[in-house]
Image (spheres, grey):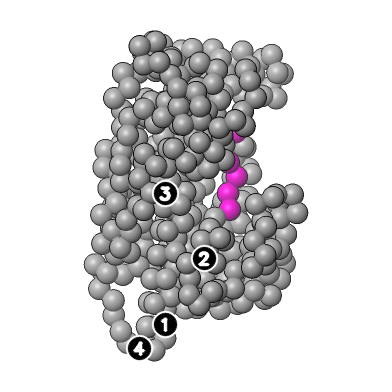
């Protein structure tokens, strides 16, 4: 995101980054950006950085990993942290606030979803089966409710589906699974379609949203009485983001593995029914929990079984028409880039 902002925007903007891991991560290296270590749940930390950076646009992309963390942490970061960022941004007169939500906020993480769009309601616990998605939905609502409230800050919520890219943990796990020969075991018939989004396309969506919000903010400042039609408005809106190329889940997983140097022989694939997979996942969860005295969780679980066998596809007509979004990197190229980022970097099994 930082590199893209600094490379495509003219004139070059001032870019500042706030993150807990600034001092520990090698990704914060662009000499043209300013980096600040801080906690988004701390009002003092956030106000301090905002006063130094004076941003027109805040891109809120911070969140714990999708799985494996307690509800309390997701609440603290995704909900309380988002509320704190919103309030501090309003207090210091930030013009625009772009939130990285998730397409999972309109899905229960269990049943199939066909052509979901922004008209679908947010899903919360107990209907929502993922605490991560529950807290992302709470934050999503906070962001949209804050639009033009307590000041003139405009907000937007972007909802990407299945973000993946070079070096990320999802891709690494799929390359590892392929390396271990586990891609030859397929849960379900393999026909279930899934929507993914390459990280570079997600960045493009953020830039388009930020630019559109700034234009609307400046237009409103210059012409206070102007009314933007509902069919064109960006502020206060949510937008689903995908690569616009649904792909069978297992084709994607095997494609990532192959790009990472570990192709699966299609003839060797053995299919396991979803119902049997759920039973095996349940047993694996308990075995790992018992043998680790409750410290670890099985990577083969009922959640991963449901995730790999469900259909989850979306419509992105809204972001195409209002923001002019078009995925620049195709699924074929994105899979090659993401999986290829692990070529020669994985330890031998």
Residue 95 lies in the magenta-colored region: no
Question: Which is the main secondary structure of the residues drawn in magenta?
Answer: loop
Q: CA distance from mark 2 to mark 3?
A: 23 Å
User: Along the horizontal axis of the image, is 325 left or right of 124?
Assistant: left
Of the two numbered discs 4 and 3 in the rendering, the one whose residue sits closer to the viewer = 3
Where does the magenta region start and end?
62-68
Distance of mark 1 from mark 4, alpha carbons? 8 Å
236 versus 251 height, above or below: below
Q: Does residue 203 appear to the left or right of 192 in the view shown?
A: right
Q: Which residue is mark 1?
A: 218
Q: Earlier in the sequence, mark 2 or mark 4?
A: 2
- Residue 119, which numbered label? none
Find the distance from the CA under tag 4 to the CA under tag 3: 33 Å
Location of mark 4 (residue) = 223
Residue 4, x across and y down, in percent: 51, 61
Residue annotated with mark 3: 160
What secondary structure is found at the residue carrying circle 1?
helix
Q: Foreground: 225 or 277?
A: 277
Quadrant hosting residue 104: top left
Q: Earlier in the sequence, mark 1 or mark 2?
A: 2
Circle 4 — which element? loop
């Amino acid at each position: 995101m930082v590199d893209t902002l600094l490379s495509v925007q003219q004139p070059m903007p001032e870019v500042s980054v706030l993150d807990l891991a600034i001092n520990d991560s090698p990704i914060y290296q662009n000499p043209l950006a300013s980096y600040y270590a801080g906690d988004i749940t701390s009002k003092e930390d956030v106000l301090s950085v905002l006063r130094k950076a004076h941003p027109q646009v805040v891109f809120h992309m911070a969140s714990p990993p999708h799985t494996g963390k307690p509800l309390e942490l997701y609440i603290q970061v995704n909900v309380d942290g988002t509320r704190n960022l919103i309030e501090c941004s309003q207090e210091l007169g930030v013009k625009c606030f772009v939130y990285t939500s998730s397409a999972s906020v309109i899905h229960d993480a269990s049943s199939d979803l066909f052509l979901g769009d922004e008209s679908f309601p947010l899903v919360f616990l107990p209907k929502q089966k993922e605490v991560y998605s529950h807290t992302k939905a709470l934050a999503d609502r906070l962001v949209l409710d804050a639009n033009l409230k307590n000041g003139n800050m405009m907000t937007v919520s972007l909802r990407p589906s299945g973000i993946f890219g070079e070096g990320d943990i999802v891709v690494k796990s799929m390359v590892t699974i392929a390396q271990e020969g586990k891609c030859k075991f397929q849960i379900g018939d393999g026909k279930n379609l899934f929507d993914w989004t390459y990280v570079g396309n997600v960045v493009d969506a953020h830039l388009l949203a930020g630019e559109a919000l700034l234009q609307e903010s400046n237009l409103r400042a210059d012409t206070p009485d102007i009314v933007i039609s509902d069919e064109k408005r960006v502020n206060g809106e949510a937008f689903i983001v995908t690569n616009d190329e649904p792909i069978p889940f297992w084709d994607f997983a095997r494609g990532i593995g192959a790009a990472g140097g570990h192709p699966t022989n299609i003839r060797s694939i053995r299919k396991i029914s979803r119902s049997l997979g759920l039973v095996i996942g349940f047993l694996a969860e308990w075995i790992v929990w018992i043998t680790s005295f409750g410290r670890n969780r099985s990577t083969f679980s009922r959640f991963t079984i449901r995730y790999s066998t469900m259909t989850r596809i979306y419509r992105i007509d809204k972001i195409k028409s209002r923001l002019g979004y078009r995925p620049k990197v195709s699924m074929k190229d994105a899979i090659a880039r993401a999986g290829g980022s692990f070529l020669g970097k994985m330890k031998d099994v």
